Amino acid sequence: MAKSQLFPVTVVGSWPRPQWLIQALRKRQAGEISFDEFNTTADDAVLAAIKYQEDANVDIVTDGEQRRDNFYSFVVEKLDGVKLMTLTELMDYMKDRASFEETLRALDVPAFAMRSPVAVDRVRRKRHLALDEFEFLKSHTTRKTKVPIPGPYMLTRSMWFPGLSDKAYPVIEDLGRDVCSIVRDEIVALKEAGCDFVQLDEPVLSQVVYGSEGEETFMCAALASRRDPTEELRYAVELMNLTVKGISGVKLGIHVCRGNWSRREDVLLRGNYGPLLPYLMEMKIDQLVLEFATPRAGELEVFKEYRGEKEIGLGIVNPRSTTVEQPKSIERRVKEATRYFEPSQVYLNPDCGFGTFAERPVNDAETAYGKLRSMGTAASNLRKAWDGRANP
Amino acid sequence: MSSSSKNLNGLEVSKMEDFVKEIRTKPDVVKNTNGPWRSRVTWQGGLKAKAYMRNHTVTFDEPEGLGATDTSASAHEHLLSAVGACMMTGFVYQGTLKGVKIHNCEIALEGTFGDIRNWAGLTDEGTPGYPEIKAKLYVKADSDRKTIERLWANAWKHSVVTQTVARGAKIIPSLEVL
């Protein structure tokens, strides 16, 4: 990689949505406007999200996930056999409601605010998951592009709910196969359309490892009938590798964080990536898009045993804080990462999106823009520092 | 849509307006609505109970730790729920009359016993009940924050159950041994 191309700056996906877009989203959810009418309104929001990123010198841009209500439940518009259900509705099907209530209280969220796409019939593709989003993005930027899509494990886990899904899918593995096929087709379609980077979002993996015990749980998505964490992680590897098998010509990443719904650090999960790394390394993907901007994520030292095995999308700014990180502190952290990764393997991104959930953005556009600019400045300084030197 | 057929938040607004008009102008409607309201609680064996209220029933039990079978919520948990449900009724009712569209609404309640030993008859000190009840409203509605705050304040200030609990209703026990 040429030095001018080192340390590409990118985002994890979402951008805070303007209020008028949220109003349109509510109308769409109430069935008052059509899918196409909503998308026409969202076009303007996507253009604004692209402009913010380009002005901040982001090298690989997304559409800000402006057309989605969150990073995974938007699939209900794209798939047949899937129903969007609030946790309030799902509570009637849960076995262990008491521990679920504990989680709700710990997170300080209402059950109605969390929605999960639930398989209520055989799942079939009605529309592409993200190809339309990508085509609009591609036609309005000359930058490299990234499209985040929900990962196969998270989709399978959140969509299979006993009592609702077992008629169409007696066991979760049956649904898993269909999900892998749908996600795989999407990656191939995105690649063929010219997408540079497909990111598979699997934030619930940290919930599997660090979340409270209980049969049903949720962090970003509801997980029903959770098994032993080791079994779950093995299953996640199996689904991921089945999904991406043989695909080349597009960068593939996996994003794992510890929750991004609240600015309260104490309600978000904590723990280093150590227990997850053996499984992430087994996945046939290029890049790990991970959070490292807060102490909750632990230290980079966990990569000591895996030096240079994969690229890192280094979470370098906190999407939830009001303070904009200084380029110098970003540069220090990136230099630390180069102890465990080749400089050509290090990408700079925020820990997570700025508006993971449409109605609960974790930051405003102005602050988010400041954070992207800081990353852009830091990347530029780092490239200069690396120019002509092996390891400054 | 004419005002007589307007439906907001799943409620027929004209019916609500008619009711408000009636209790404003007709003392006999006020008298009838005031009550008495009744419940008959029957023993179902163990620590289980069943309450009959008009044509409705609710069951009660206690956790297994007490030697019970935990088939239903405890009476004190029903109390928490009743406080929350009553506040929600007031919030939605008043909000609807003011034309506020409520998309979603949820109340999380919590109480901690003063001293369980008092309940068990081991001491007369303190109270076996909840010295305080926390209630947090989560709401998504088409309205400004100030209006929502006012509706929420009125919801507990004018709630039948909340005020019964907060003001400590006088209980008049009596007994007949058969």
Image (spheres, coloured by chain):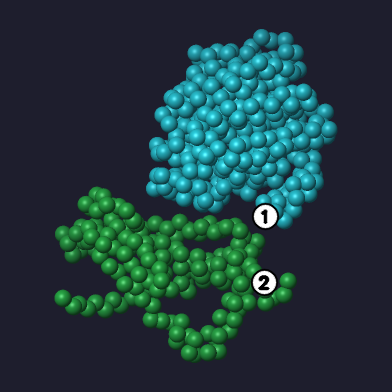
In which image quadrant can residue A79 be found? Answer: top right
Q: Estimate the x, y position of residue A386 in percent, counting from the top left.
A: 69, 15
Quarter of the rendering occupied by the N terminus of chain A? top right
Q: Specify the amino acid type for callout 2.
A: Lys
* Labels 1 and 2 in the same subunit: no
Q: At 17% from the left edge and 62% from the top edge, which residue is drawn?
A: B121
Q: At 24% from the left edge and 53% from the top edge, which residue is drawn?
A: B68
* Chain identifier of the residue bearing label 1 in the image: A
Task: Write down which chain is painted cyan.
Answer: A
Q: Estimate the x, y position of residue B117 in percent, counting from the top left.
A: 20, 57
- Label 1 belongs to which residue? A30
Q: Is residue A4 above or below residue B80?
A: above
Q: Estimate the x, y position of residue A251 in percent, counting from the top left.
A: 69, 21
Q: At 35% from the left edge and 59% from the top edge, which residue is drawn?
A: B77
Q: Which residue is more in the foreground, A82 or A385?
A: A82
Q: Is residue A303 visible?
A: yes
- Label 2 belongs to which residue? B6
Q: Residues within 10 Å of mark 2 (few under 14, many from 20)?
A: few
Q: Is residue A372 visible?
A: no
